[in-house]
Image (tube, rainbow, N blue to C red):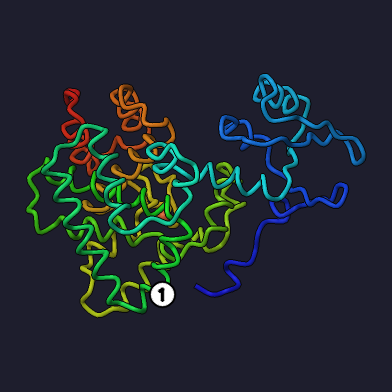
Amino acid sequence: MSEENNEQPSQELAKEVVIDGVVYFFMPIDVAIKYSDKIKSGFFIPLSEEKRVRIEFGEDDLKGKMVNYKEKGLANILFAKEDYFLFLSSIKRGLTGFFMKDDELASKTLSQQQILMLVSKAVKYIGLDDELVAAGEENANKVLNWVKTAPSINQYFKPFITTNQDEHLKNLFVGFIGIGLVRALSWPPQIYEKIMQAALFGDFTLSDKDIMQVILANGDRSKWSKSYHIHPTEATRLLGRLKNAFSREVLRAIEQHHELPDGSGFPNGLKGLSIDQMSAMLIVARHYVNKLIETNFAYDDRKGFIDEMLSVHFDFPNFQQPCKSLYIVMGIEVPQK
Ligand SMILES: [Fe+2]
């Protein structure tokens, strides 16, 4: 990863304005609407170059007001710099936001043990059994202890897990679910560590800024940073340099962790059968975890959103097994085709 890859925020996202000596940042109104329940400060609605309306935190129906302005064609709202970053970090906060109600605690850097406790709590919350939790913890510890002995990776990994703690937590969660999926299909336990490696080492080349840009881009890939576009390939390249540390299937699963069988994934837009079996397990696990976090752990609706997720993206032969497994792991009857 070169330095310059990190230094190219899109013009629009970086736009700022000074009002009465205070720096304000532009936030896409779509993002503000989508995450309106996480707004904890006032902001400005810019009506023209000179004219703005101030909306105070706590006013009735913030979301409705923004939707109205959006319908009138407004593309951005204005947050004071500090509030802008607070809002973004509360959007990023998935697991800590849900399982640590204390905001101050949630923004702290957690120890490896605290992180594992939190993920185990999340995994138990969605109904997975103690044996799986133990297998997840054991393999996560193996992988996390190994990386401390690999300076060429740890120089990226260590800053990654502190600045992007919630991404790291999410990846751990994916590792636990991934182990659950292969266990339900009776894959041998020796594979668990590989699943955990592939889950944990996909994103370590990313900075806080890369992740924030993805949030602000709200689905528009042209607004992602270059580092984000290439991060699966970049992580694979760095890990592949370590002779014999990772098996070929683990490297493939890392390279393919954002691919989707309908070809809508990245970086290569792979389709159907060109996605490997272990990759497919982790792609399904990741999709499921993202969905859980997005819906604030709407665990009771899990059948609906597993059905939807599987019928939209995963209706391909090499995804049958992981999908079937997800139903089993979540204690739902496997639909008959
Ligand atoms: Fe990733």
Q: Residue at x 44, y 53 (%)?
A: 266
For label 1, the crowd category at 10 Å Cα-Cα, with few meaning under 14, some 14 to 19 and many 20 or more, is: some
- Front in this rendered view, residue 64 or 134: 134
Location of residue 158 in the rendering, given as x and y in whole percent from the top left corner: 40, 68
- Front in this rendered view, residue 168 or 97: 97
Q: Residue at x 53, y 42 (%)?
A: 90
- Front in this rendered view, residue 13 or 143: 143
Which residue in the protein does label 1 denote? 155
In the image, residue 68 above or below residue 278: above
Location of residue 224 in the rendering, given as x and y in whole percent from the top left corner: 57, 54
82 on left or right of 130: right
Which amino acid type is shown beneath numbered disc 1?
Gln
Total labels: the figure holds 1
Quadrant position of the C terminus in the picture: top left
Q: Identify the element where label 1 is drawn.
A: helix
Image quadrant of residue 60? Answer: top right
